[in-house]
Image (cartoon, grey):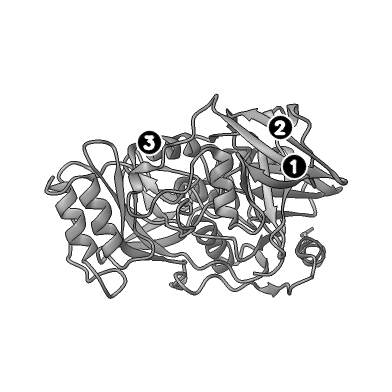
Amino acid sequence: MSGPTTYGPEVYRGPQRIRQGVTLTLVFGAVLATGAATGSIGGHRAAYDGRPGAYGRRAAGSRPAAEPASASGTGLDTAEIARAIDDGRVGPQAAAQLVSRSGDRWSAFYTAQQYEGFQQELNGTYTGVGLWVRRAPDGVVSVSRVQSASPAERAGLRVGDLLTAIDGHPVTGLPVTEVVARLRGVDPADPDDPQDAPAPRPGSTVRLALQRAGRSWTVSLRRAVLPADAVTVTQPEAGVTDIAVDSFVHGVGGQVRAALDHGDHRDGVLLDLRGNSGGLVTEAVATASAFLDGGLVATYDVHGTEHSLYAARGPADTMTPLVVLVDGGTMSAAELLTGALQDRGRAVVVGSRTFGKGSVQMPSTLPDGSAAELTVGHYRTPTGRAVDGVGIRPDVTVGGGQDARAEGEAVLSGLDTGP
């Protein structure tokens, strides 16, 4: 993906996973220490982080229905690892080592403190200072957005400010994932000891070195619990509503439906999923239900047993012209939603090929609250298309240097608005 990479609010996420349970959850995030991503449709009390994963405890007594080969084709069998954890045969350190040896790029281990932070973010909040950041191709890190009423806004930070160091650590040239980790108060973990990375805490202090128009200065900010602001609704022109969804946290489906109920979108809706790396599958399905009156949204398998997700029956906006904007940062639950709207003929998809995270992970928790995320299967779109490693191909491709939103608006203007 060309051009600058943007993450926020101080949350970088990677792909998701799928799991069966009381509440289906497709969780996302990228590992702070390595920048690798993971995710799943999770279930029983599952949560997501600003790192990878959905966390929760499996239903009591549940066991894999089959014994799959290693998820990656090499290394240890993830089903056997899950059994060892569930049977209490391994502790946190051993579980972390087993996950590392599994050979599966999407499996991951998380400490209890990390899990606590993930639950917070699934509830639509995060601990940070209210900054979105991006890294230009030359490695320069800048502020792309400042959250209203946040510590960063109160300190006078502005869009375009250059971020040069965090707590004395230079950030120019660093992976954005590492910059975000330091902003949030989670130092990159020692890959040989994943339990040394604590969760970010409200009230902790971070010192930023910044530049603006040739002036350099430092500022100390106290982290706070802030709303994630996952949905942004704007009206670029009369009759068109732009709904940008950054992630699928609690309440997003209702917010999208409210935007449809109260906005002026007689000429169409732009659903912007660019950079959306996933979240709760229940919220992705609820968003699909705002545009689809029932019907299949996706199928997924857990150890070879297939399950289905359906849009709710009832009032839905099935007629308004709809364009979905996607890019290489559109992942997991966002790909699931995109594939459903595309396969069902409800939307025209505009942008570039999506990330391609369609593998399914299931969390196994340990007595201390830590968790291991292990791959168990994959999900498919309503027509049976696989997503993992392939992504969603847009109906209208937008090349590098082109304005995806402008192209989306042009496509929208050409769609039939009905009588």
Extreme residue in the top direction = 203
The C terminus: image quadrant: bottom right
Eye-nearest disc, 1 or 3: 1
Dot 1 amino acid type: Leu
Answer yes or no: is residue 260 visible.
no
Question: Which residue lies under the disc numbered 3?
Answer: 113
Where on the picture, by quarter, is residue 305? bottom left
Who is closer to the viewer here, 133 or 353?
133
Mark 2 residue element: strand
What is the number of the mark on residue 210?
Answer: 1
Expressed as whole percent of the image width and height from the top left, the position of residue 364 reads 26, 48
Q: How many labels does the image show?
A: 3
Q: How far apart are marks 1 and 3 (CA)?
A: 30 Å
Residue at 59 percent across and 61 percent down: it is 329
Dot 2 amino acid type: Val
Mark 3 residue element: helix
What is the number of the mark on residue 318?
Answer: none
Dot 3 or dot 2: first in sequence order is 3
Q: Are marks 1 and 2 in contact (CB under 8 Å)?
A: yes
Q: Please say if 122 is above or below 107.
A: above
Dot 3 amino acid type: Gln
